[in-house]
């Protein structure tokens, strides 16, 4: 059993897609074991995406992530990191497989509805960035 960190991004919360996205996780066997809806601060968004700070889209990404509420979650399940990324689909919705969250809901490569950790180390770091141990049940 493994844990991963997920964000339902502002483009999705604005369009009232939170429940539909969570259903996709649950249908895939992922369990929501922590969840909170927050308005990210610029400092939080810059810290969370610090690995992308030299990329040309960094400013746009931070502006987008603070443009509305997000739902941060910890998902648990067998092979949760890979499974979550499978359910999310490719970063660019044009390349995402049918039935994935990004194929169905994403608006563009930037406004792509969800974030999911990409490795065990980043999952652990990202979970710790937003949640206390006692919030994860
Ligand atoms: P995430 O980390 O959000 O789960 P990912 O791992 O598929 O997505 P990354 O390459 O880590 O994609 O990029 C992080 C985020 O930065 C993407 O989800 C997207 O919102 C944004 N992004 C990536 N590439 C671009 C781009 N070319 N233009 C605009 N935004 C981008
Ligand atoms: Mg990533």
Image (cartoon, helix red, strand yellow):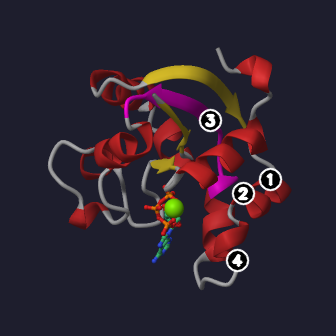
Q: Is mark 3 within 8 Å of ligand 1?
A: no
Residue located farthest toward the left when viewing the structure as drawn = 98
Tell me the tag on residue 53: 4
Tell me the tag on residue 23: none
Give the quadrant of the N terminus: top left
**Mark 3 — residue?**
72
Real-space Cα separation, disc 3 to disc 4, in angstroms: 21 Å
Q: Position of residue 8 (x, y in %)?
A: 52, 40
Q: Tell me, yes or no, whether the two marked residues, 2 and 1, touch with CB atoms within 8 Å.
A: yes
Element under disc 2: helix
Element under disc 1: helix
Residue 77 colored in magenta in the image: yes
Q: Position of residue 75 (x, y in %)?
A: 51, 30
Q: Tell me, yes or no, whether the two marked residues, 1 and 4, touch with CB atoms within 8 Å.
A: no
Residue 39 visible in this rendered orientation of the protein: no
**Mark 1 — residue?**
44
Q: Nearer the viewer, residue 125 or 18?
A: 125
Q: Is mark 1 within 8 Å of ligand 1?
A: no
First to last magenta residue range: 65-78
- How crowded pointer 4 is (Cα within 10 Å; few <14, some 14-19, many 20+) is rated as some
State which quadrant residue 94 falls in. bottom left
- How crowded pointer 3 is (Cα within 10 Å; few <14, some 14-19, many 20+) is rated as many
Real-space Cα separation, disc 1 to disc 3, in angstroms: 12 Å
Real-space Cα separation, disc 2 to disc 1, in angstroms: 6 Å
Element under disc 4: loop
Element under disc 3: strand
In primary-sequence order, the first of circles 1 and 3 is 1
Residue 112 visible in this rendered orientation of the protein: yes
In primary-sequence order, the first of circles 3 and 4 is 4
**Mark 2 — residue?**
48
């Amino acid at each position: 059993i493994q844990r991963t960190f997920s964000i339902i991004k502002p483009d999705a919360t604005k369009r009232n897609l939170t429940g539909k996205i969570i259903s996709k996780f649950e249908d895939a066997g992922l369990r929501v074991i922590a969840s909170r809806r927050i308005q990210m601060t610029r400092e939080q968004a810059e810290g969370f995406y610090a690995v992308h700070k030299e990329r040309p889209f960094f400013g746009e990404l931070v502006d987008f992530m603070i443009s509305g509420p997000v739902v941060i979650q910890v998902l648990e399940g067998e092979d949760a990191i890979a499974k979550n990324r499978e359910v999310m689909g490719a970063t660019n919705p044009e390349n995402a497989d049918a039935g994935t969250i990004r194929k169905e809901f994403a608006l563009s490569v930037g406004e792509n509805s969800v974030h999911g950790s990409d490795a065990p180390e980043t999952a652990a770091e990202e979970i710790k960035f937003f949640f206390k141990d006692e919030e994860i049940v």
